[in-house]
Image (cartoon, rainbow, N blue to C red):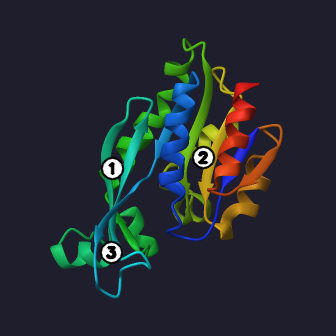
Amino acid sequence: MLFILTGNVQIGKSRWLERLADDLTRLGVTCYGVIAPGIWVESNTDAANDQGYEKLGINNLLLPDNVTVPFAQRADIACANGTYADLSQAGRVGLGWHIDDAAIARVNEHLSSIEKRAEDDRRRKLLVIDELGRLELDHESGLVEAMRLLRNGPCAGMKDALAVVRETFAERAESLFAETWNGVLRIAPTRQDAELVKRHLAE
């Protein structure tokens, strides 16, 4: 089964996913893959959300080891501090986030090792990909190893996957991956859907 977690931007999808991964670990389910938590600070600028927080960047949390990789800065911040690279993968397509190509390579390296690492893990497993966006779905770049894993379907005893996409990409992700994962279910970052995923993986 492929779960597609979607919803509007900045509604807490990655925070929800971190909590779900912690719950699944306590239930004996191993999560392999990547979660992309935001870097937030309190703010009273125009960039702040309704709760008074501003998103400055994005980390990548590599599962199951919980290694944190600094991944992206907001493009305007990267321009201001001189780290923005026009010829980077993100720069060439004009993303609102500046993603260092070395960080993309590091995450791809981790994702490419998952099948081998998971082979000897006899526990129930969930492949987690947070997230697929314009680089992956429009330009066949970015987290190419995530795309490969999802296109290949279940492997190394991982019968289930959860991928995060924005609502505009949800239908395309379903059409690309549903057949290889023997079905797809679109979910939201709610308590009810967290319980649904946990019940499925406990079966």
- Dot placed on the residue nearer the N-terminal end, 2 or 3: 3
Q: Position of residue 85 (x, y in %)?
A: 28, 69
Q: Amino acid at mark 1?
A: Ala
Q: Which residue is mark 2?
A: 147
Q: Secondary structure at mark 3?
A: helix
Q: Residue at x 76, y 62 (%)?
A: 171
Mark 3: which amino acid? Ala
Point 67% across, 70% down: residue: 168
Q: CA distance from mark 2 to mark 1?
A: 17 Å
Classify residue 105 by image quadrant: top left
- Label 1 sits on residue: 103
Of residues 150 and 85, the one nearer the viewer is 150
Where does residue 24 sit, x and y in percent of width and height?
Answer: 57, 31
Distance CA(mark 2)–CA(mark 3): 24 Å
Residue at horizontal 53 percent and vertical 66 percent from the top: 11
Question: Are the two marked residues, 2 and 3, in contact with CB atoms closer than 8 angstroms?
Answer: no
Eye-nearest disc, 2 or 3: 3
Are there few (<14), some (14-19), or many (20+) residues within 10 Å of tag 3?
A: many
Residue 54's disc number:
none
